[in-house]
């Protein structure tokens, strides 16, 4: 068998996170010979440090929401073919303030609310037993659109399936020095007709002069794995009031302003640390819980207990219980103040794609279809 650098490819994808894998899939489905190059031996960045939660409800109205809906369809198809278990479906947004209820009602009146339901507190506890011990009765918005995979398992399986089912070649532990579109690497030059660069939150290794024009930064988030809840399984992934002022599909509604003002009075530390609650459940019953948001050109590697305590405080409000922390970690992803995704065109044969909003799992598949169509159309 010849070494990957001795072949010619229709397209080389640089980066094997979810964004890169999505572009490999879109190109391979178009019948193209695809090589994926990555500097690490296995997925190690944002794609495996997150919730694995394909979120539709709450994504920004318009393009982002439409991309999330399309990506969810592709995830559904790919998961069954790649033996990736879908661990949970749907989303339950448990809110405890009247201002939050007003946001949910306004959301339901938009096209994004199609298929969603609002449960009053007395009905919510019957429909969602996981909230039975909550400190305060919750009004719950339920969305059927979401699905959730274990990203630590899903990303490697997706890569393996791309290799097996679509003949995508992977070249790992390889540094890329330049893209012209031919790819100069630490293992030699790779001949290709086109290249798609998916650098994640590395803005300096390739095309640094172009990426510098977008004023990108990096976001650090705290994540935890908790012991299972004592009263059983989660019916769906869970969010709370804090998510309604963070997720733009809610936060950009006029009704979100009174909620934001109240949260500024009642939970200023949570807002200052960019905290909103997401809780998902693994097959063994353990919970993946987060998260927070701190921005810097180079985020520090430290995870103060005080930030975790704020996340756990919101968890206790929603579920009425404390759960033991089994594991802690931090993640980082690319961030921008004025865009959710960056698609740059250095030349007719090269594209740079950066998901700048932490929505890689939720939007990458749809973005990849658009980029591949543009590149080869």
Image (tube, rainbow, N blue to C red):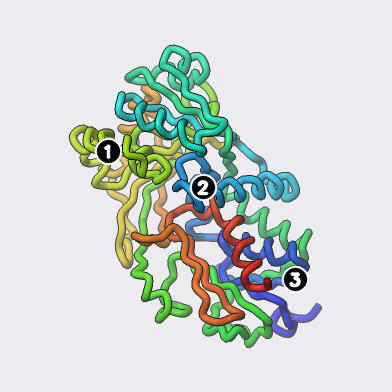
Residue appearing at x 61%, y 37% in the figure: 87
Q: Seen from this angle, which residue lies furthest right?
A: 1
Task: Name which residue lies at 46% across and 31% down.
Answer: 108
Between residue 335 and residue 257, name the one nearer to us. Answer: 257
> Which residue is found at the position 49% from the left and 39% from the top?
57
Which element is circle 2 on? helix
Residue corresponding to mark 1: 257
Label pair 3/2, CB-CB below 8 angstroms: no
Q: How crowded is mark 2: few (under 14 residues within 10 Å), some or many (20 or more)?
A: many
Q: Are marks 3 and 1 in contact (CB under 8 Å)?
A: no
Above or below, comparing residue 263 to residue 181 in the picture = above
Q: Where is residue 304 in the image (x, y as percent from the top left)?
A: 28, 48
Residue holding disc 3: 32
Name which quarter of the figure residue 93 lies in.
Answer: top left
| Residue closer to the observer: 353 or 61 | 61
- Residue 277 pos. (x, y %): 38, 38
Q: Nearer the viewer, residue 355 or 178?
A: 355
CA neighbours of label 1 inside 10 A, class few (<14), some (14 to 19), many (20+): some
Pick the quarter of the image with the N terminus: bottom right
What secondary structure is found at the residue carrying circle 3? Answer: loop
Quadrant for the C terminus in the image: bottom right
Residue for badge 2 = 65
Which comes before the other along the chain, label 3 or label 2?
3
């Amino acid at each position: 068998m010849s070494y990957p650098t001795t072949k010619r490819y229709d397209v080389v994808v640089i980066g094997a996170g979810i964004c890169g894998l999505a572009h490999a899939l879109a190109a391979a489905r178009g019948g193209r010979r695809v090589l994926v190059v990555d500097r690490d031996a296995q997925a190690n960045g944002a794609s495996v440090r997150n919730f694995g939660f394909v979120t539709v409800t709450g994504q920004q109205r318009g393009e982002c929401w439409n991309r999330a809906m399309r990506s969810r369809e592709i995830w559904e198809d790919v998961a069954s073919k790649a033996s990736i278990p879908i661990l949970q479906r749907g989303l339950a947004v448990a809110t405890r303030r009247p201002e939050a209820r007003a946001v949910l009602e306004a959301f339901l009146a938009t096209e994004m609310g199609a298929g969603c339901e609002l449960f009053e507190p007395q009905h919510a506890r019957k429909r969602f037993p996981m909230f039975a011990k909550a400190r305060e009765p919750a009004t719950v918005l339920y969305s059927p659109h979401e699905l959730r995979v274990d990203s630590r398992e899903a990303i490697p399986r997706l890569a393996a399936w791309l290799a097996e089912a679509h003949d995508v070649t992977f070249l790992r532990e390889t540094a890329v020095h330049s893209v012209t579109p031919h790819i100069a690497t630490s293992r030699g030059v790779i001949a290709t007709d086109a290249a798609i660069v998916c650098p994640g939150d590395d803005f300096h290794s390739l095309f640094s002069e172009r990426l510098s024009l977008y004023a990108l930064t990096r976001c650090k988030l705290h994540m935890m794995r908790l012991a299972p809840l004592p009263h059983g399984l989660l019916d769906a992934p869970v969010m709370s009031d804090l998510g309604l002022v963070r997720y733009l599909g809610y936060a950009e509604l006029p009704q979100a302003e009174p909620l934001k003002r109240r949260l500024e009075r009642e939970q200023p530390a949570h807002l200052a640390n960019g905290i909103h609650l997401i809780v998902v459940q693994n097959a063994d019953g353990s919970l993946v819980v987060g998260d927070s948001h701190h921005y810097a050109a180079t985020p520090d590697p430290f995870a103060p207990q005080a930030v975790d305590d704020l996340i756990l405080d919101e968890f206790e409000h929603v579920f009425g219980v404390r759960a033991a922390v089994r594991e802690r970690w931090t993640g980082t992803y690319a961030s921008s103040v004025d865009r959710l995704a960056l698609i740059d065109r250095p030349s007719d044969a090269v594209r740079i794609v950066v998901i700048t909003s932490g929505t890689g799992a939720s939007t990458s598949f749809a973005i990849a279809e658009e980029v591949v169509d543009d590149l080869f159309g």
